Image (spheres, grey):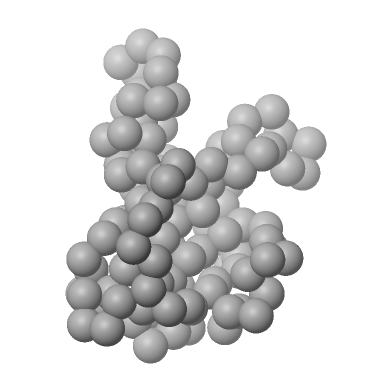
Amino acid sequence: MREQLDRGFVYQMGPIDWWPGWADLDEAVAQRGGDERTRAQARTELEGIRDHALHEFRDRTYWEGDIVTGPVFAGLPPGDGNSDGDVMVGVKQMNNGSVFVSSPYEPPWLSGYAV
């Protein structure tokens, strides 16, 4: 994964009830594999990406801070010449089911939900 802590792209959309291919933090770390040190580094990096995404949701959307699903991670192919994949982060708000997604790249299919 590359350093994702730039502003990135944030999306706000209606409820999503099925999240195929998305993983919580523990699942994402397990998918990374490797020895204990590698998994610890992956956890630290993913926690930073998650915290940054939550900060962006607070600053740029109407997210109320409550979560019914997530934070969850979805893999993205590597970009910008790096050899590791990147991740998107998503949460589903408990209050009205709104979904918020943060991505280091602009997924064109989400452009109508950009904030």
Residue 66 in which image quadrant: bottom left
**Where's residue 69, x and y in %?**
26, 60
Q: How many marks?
A: 0
The answer to whether residue 55 shows anywhere in this view is no
**Where's residue 42, x and y in %?**
40, 32
* Quadrant position of the C terminus in the picture: bottom right
Residue lying at 36% horizontally and 11% vertically, measured from the top left: 35
* Identity of the residue furthest to the right in this view: 81
Along the line of sight, which residue is nearer the eye, 69 or 32?
Answer: 69
Residue 59 in which image quadrant: bottom left
* Identity of the residue furthest to the bottom in this view: 62
Residue 110 in which image quadrant: bottom right
Residue lying at 54% horizontally and 72% vertically, measured from the top left: 10
* Quadrant position of the N terminus in the picture: top right
Residue lying at 68% horizontally and 74% vertically, measured from the top left: 111
**Where's residue 46, x and y in %?**
40, 43
Along the line of sight, which residue is nearer the eye, 6 or 110?
Answer: 110
Q: In the visual, does 62 lie left or right of 74? A: left
**Where's residue 78, x and y in %?**
68, 38
Vertically, is 103 above or below 94? above
The answer to whether residue 76 shows anywhere in this view is yes
Residue lying at 29% horizontally and 57% vertically, measured from the top left: 70
* Identity of the residue furthest to the top in this view: 35
Vertically, is 113 above or below 23? below
